[in-house]
Amino acid sequence: MPEHIYKKVELVGSSKDGVEDAIEGAIARAAETLRNLDWFEVKEIRGNIRDGKPEYYQVTLSVGFRVMDAEDMQKG
Amino acid sequence: MPEHIYKKVELVGSSKDGVEDAIEGAIARAAETLRNLDWFEVKEIRGNIRDGKPEYYQVTLSVGFRVMDAEDMQKG
Amino acid sequence: MPEHIYKKVELVGSSKDGVEDAIEGAIARAAETLRNLDWFEVKEIRGNIRDGKPEYYQVTLSVGFRVMDAEDMQKG
Amino acid sequence: MPEHIYKKVELVGSSKDGVEDAIEGAIARAAETLRNLDWFEVKEIRGNIRDGKPEYYQVTLSVGFRVMDAEDMQKG
Amino acid sequence: MPEHIYKKVELVGSSKDGVEDAIEGAIARAAETLRNLDWFEVKEIRGNIRDGKPEYYQVTLSVGFRVMDAEDMQKG
Amino acid sequence: MPEHIYKKVELVGSSKDGVEDAIEGAIARAAETLRNLDWFEVKEIRGNIRDGKPEYYQVTLSVGFRVMDAEDMQKG
Amino acid sequence: MPEHIYKKVELVGSSKDGVEDAIEGAIARAAETLRNLDWFEVKEIRGNIRDGKPEYYQVTLSVGFRVMDAEDMQKG
Amino acid sequence: MPEHIYKKVELVGSSKDGVEDAIEGAIARAAETLRNLDWFEVKEIRGNIRDGKPEYYQVTLSVGFRVMDAEDMQKG
Amino acid sequence: MPEHIYKKVELVGSSKDGVEDAIEGAIARAAETLRNLDWFEVKEIRGNIRDGKPEYYQVTLSVGFRVMDAEDMQKG
Amino acid sequence: MPEHIYKKVELVGSSKDGVEDAIEGAIARAAETLRNLDWFEVKEIRGNIRDGKPEYYQVTLSVGFRVMDAEDMQKG
Amino acid sequence: MPEHIYKKVELVGSSKDGVEDAIEGAIARAAETLRNLDWFEVKEIRGNIRDGKPEYYQVTLSVGFRVMDAEDMQKG
Amino acid sequence: MPEHIYKKVELVGSSKDGVEDAIEGAIARAAETLRNLDWFEVKEIRGNIRDGKPEYYQVTLSVGFRVMDAEDMQKG
């Protein structure tokens, strides 16, 4: 019986509201295309500044998903 | 006069609500057992995904507390 | 035509409310003195603990701003 | 004459048998889809525990392959 | 409903046979004392040399287990 | 209004001429396939040696591009 | 014959006199509770400042000791 | 006789021409304001992309200079 | 009530006598100019060699101080 | 009485069989030339791929040996 | 049939002209003494500053070469 | 005129007295064999423990020296 294989893709989510919102946006977008999303790891938190305030929080994520077939391997 | 000694333990808190809530949960649990909790350092932020959303935020913390006696050294 | 030069300063913001609030406080304070703040990078998230809870979230930031003249280089 | 370009993808192989078996499984799966696999780098070795033993070794790999055309760039 | 809390302990297993055997030895020893062992992460692989050969493989692991009550927090 | 999402892919460019030429070659190749390339980060500089000289400079890049739709997510 | 298992605990020693004194204080305190202390690794050197001078040197150590039985695993 | 003290500032130079030109631009700008510039360390090489090519190389430098008096400490 | 903001500056102290003396020299010099110095972190220990001996120990420090007003932000 | 001095050399072993075999090959080769080999540390695990399988495991090691005299210092 | 063993040595090349020239100088010098140079990895880019300009670019390289016999192991 | 080339070797000094003494011992030993020692960088501080005290401080150094001719390249 073959054992599980996962692939990880690196995404950057952005949000005016904060870190969790940027994470959720990136994962929601990935979920439109990729099946079997399984976990995420935060790699970097940064953002741009406008008028003395953070304008966008930008969170770099590594997102792991299970590869079931050749289509999963190519996607993501 | 002996100078202070601290011990650090590594915990992972999890929360459906976000990073701060996961941190607070882990520290609250530690405080039930350990005296003199003093500071924490975030080591990693990750989480699992279900239905295209983060289900649990998982935050790895290093938590420092002051060691007053042998019991403190063994606990934690 | 001279190309842009940026300088980065390292700040630590603190907040009882959470990570984003600590970031925003540090950037707001920097903006009182420094022109042309452009971006921030989170370097460390930590905090002190009192009564079994985080008292202050302490977030170390690297903040970049554009250097227009000698005054900008000295400030920050 | 154009010079070589490579792309790297991050995969996680898992195996009940050990580190090398997890690596080989991930590479075999990638080879079903991607041409010109060239090298791998081990990024992380971890695993889950069941009944006091490692159940699965989970090895994160970065796998490099040569990009010959647009199809290679999109795949992987 | 309270959410899960985990604790991580750092162990070094040693084996004349290789990396996986050193990992399994350390986890087996931990399992005699700690409930709910959940995962491990390899932090370092090294060893001592005798007569021109590795004598012992020494593998440093971070081992995570779920904390159910105060006894779990103190153990490990 | 949805906020921006980016994806990062890891490429290795090679050049007999030097670091910048290897970077430009990798980005030019990526631009044949991927829309909205936005930034790059150098991860590693290495090369092979022949006859006492670097033959190819090999530069590993992380390249970020904006994800507009499902096709962008799958490509890259 | 079972092979050796070690556990590592993270301690912070502090001293007004310097780095070695902070290390020795932390190890002496650990030795009151833990048997078979074997080695230490310096992880961080820092300190607080008062009146324009370092007041305490604070040295974070990882201390390894051999685990002989269940009591050793729980202690430390 | 007092021994030397140095201060390090972090700058980002940008150039359309390449890495060395970005370094030289940042140092030249610093030299208009700071005395006794002594050495630099490259921390990061990145850039933005326009029309399938690097538009600006952006090189982050740590620049060290000798502190002779209070004015030097404040500048930079 | 506004919460505390800190700034960190990077200094290199040098001493013929050793690590602690290099640290103390850098902090003493900083204290002539900067108010409210609060803590230091050792980033690097190195030195130059003359006649088969270390001539100067060179210790790179990150020094944190509390920012009370615009003058503090500009200094340091 | 003079205290021990060690030197470390960096080697890469390769093997078709796996990680431990690559380590053992590199150490055996070093032992033909160097006396007093004492310990090794694994720095990197990678390999090349041929026909959808790892062809050679390549393991980078740092190998430490005790320096007894000038000949030991030059060798290795 | 014995498998390949490589050794890596760390060199620093310096050049007034730039990064590639410093790399080429260090490799050319190594090639006068060492056979079978195979690859290099850039570890650090820094330099000294004179009169507001980089005077020397200093590039630290790890250079790998194949070890064919005892003489190769001792050299380099 | 050829520009300077340096080589770096990694040594571990040990001392019962402390960090500086371990550094000085390793450099003194190297100076018996190698010409033109120029600088050192501390890579790791650790030690073994006996009877609840550090017995030996073990300091890993990278030591740089200028390569003047083929003999220098082979030594060290």
Image: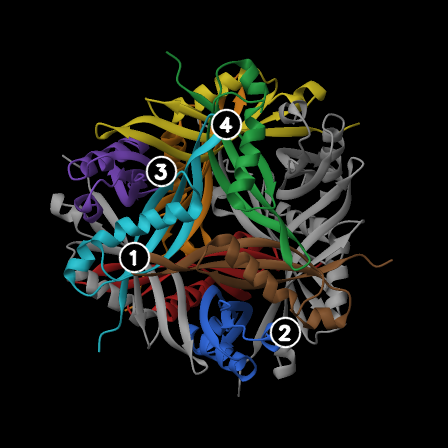
Chain colours: A purple, B yellow, C orange, D cyan, E green, H red, J brown, K blue
B20 left or right, relative to J44: left
Q: Residue at x 56, y 43 (%)?
A: E59
Q: CA distance from mark 4 to mark 3?
A: 26 Å
User: What amino acid type should be assigned to the residue bearing mark 3?
Assistant: Glu
Label 1 sits on a secondary structure element that is: loop
Which residue: 60% across, 61% down? J27
Residue plotted at (51% across, 81% down): K31
| Residue under numbered circle 2 | K74
**Which mark, by number, is residue D52?**
4
Q: Is residue B68 above or below residue E26?
A: above
The span from disc 2 to disc 1 (Cα, nearest Å) is 37 Å
**Horizontal arrangement in the rendering, residue D16 relative to residue D33 (left or right):** right
Element type where label 3 sits in the image: strand
- Asked if both marks, 3 and 1, belong to the same chain, the answer given is no
Q: Residues within 10 Å of mark 2 (few under 14, many from 20)?
A: many
> Which disc, if any, is residue D69?
none
